[in-house]
Structure formats: C-alpha cells, structure tokens
C-alpha cells in the first residue's frame, strides 16, 4: 500500500492542506500519523473517497434546472 502526503492528497482534491486536516478531524478521511506527528494517507482510501465525492458532485449537477436559459 502506498502512502500519500497531505500535500499530495490536497492536490488530488484541489483543496488546501488545511481542508484535508479538517476532513481528518471530522472523520471523512483516515490518516496514519507517525511518531513525529506527520500525517500520511493510504492511496486506496483517498481514491475511494474521491470516487464517492465525484459521484456526489455529478449527482448534484444533474438537478440543475437550465430550462430558464432557453
């Protein structure tokens, strides 16, 4: 299993590292903390959450009513 740094995860989601820290504190993403306090993430966990998040975004966008723009 490959571990990703907080910067790599932030780049994948196009958010700041602080957002990733918030997601961790809320239990959205699980991290592995080293004894020195450095946070890492399993690539598989990140990919799984990305799929869920992307599916939710696509689901939301399917409800946009563009009938007024015609």
Image: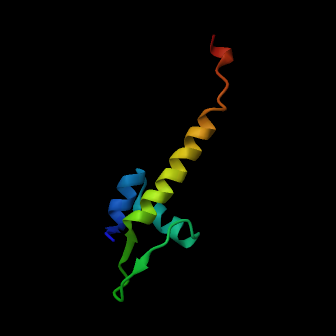
Q: Quadrant of residue 17?
A: bottom left
Q: Position of residue 14 (x, y in %)?
A: 40, 50
Q: Is residue 42 above or below residue 33?
A: above
Quadrant of image for the C terminus? top right
Point 35% across, 79% down: residue: 38
Point 49% across, 72% down: residue: 30
Point 37% across, 64% down: residue: 43
Horizontal arrangement in the rendering, residue 35 relative to residue 29 (left or right): left
Q: Tell me how many marks there are.
A: 0
Q: Is residue 34 above or below residue 63?
A: below
Q: Position of residue 10 (x, y in %)?
A: 39, 58
Residue lying farthest bottom?
35
Q: Position of residue 67 (x, y in %)?
A: 68, 17
Q: Position of residue 37 (x, y in %)?
A: 38, 83
Colouring of the image: rainbow
Residue lying farthest front?
1
Q: Nearer the viewer, residue 48 or 67?
A: 48
Q: Nearer the viewer, residue 4 or 68?
A: 4
Point 61% across, 39% down: residue: 59
């Amino acid at each position: 299993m490959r571990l990703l740094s907080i910067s790599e995860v932030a780049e994948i989601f196009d958010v700041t590292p602080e957002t990733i820290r918030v997601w961790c504190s809320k239990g959205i993403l699980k991290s592995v903390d080293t004894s020195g306090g450095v946070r890492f993430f399993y690539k598989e966990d990140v990919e799984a959450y990305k799929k869920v998040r992307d599916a939710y975004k696509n689901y939301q966008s399917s409800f946009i009513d563009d009938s007024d723009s015609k």
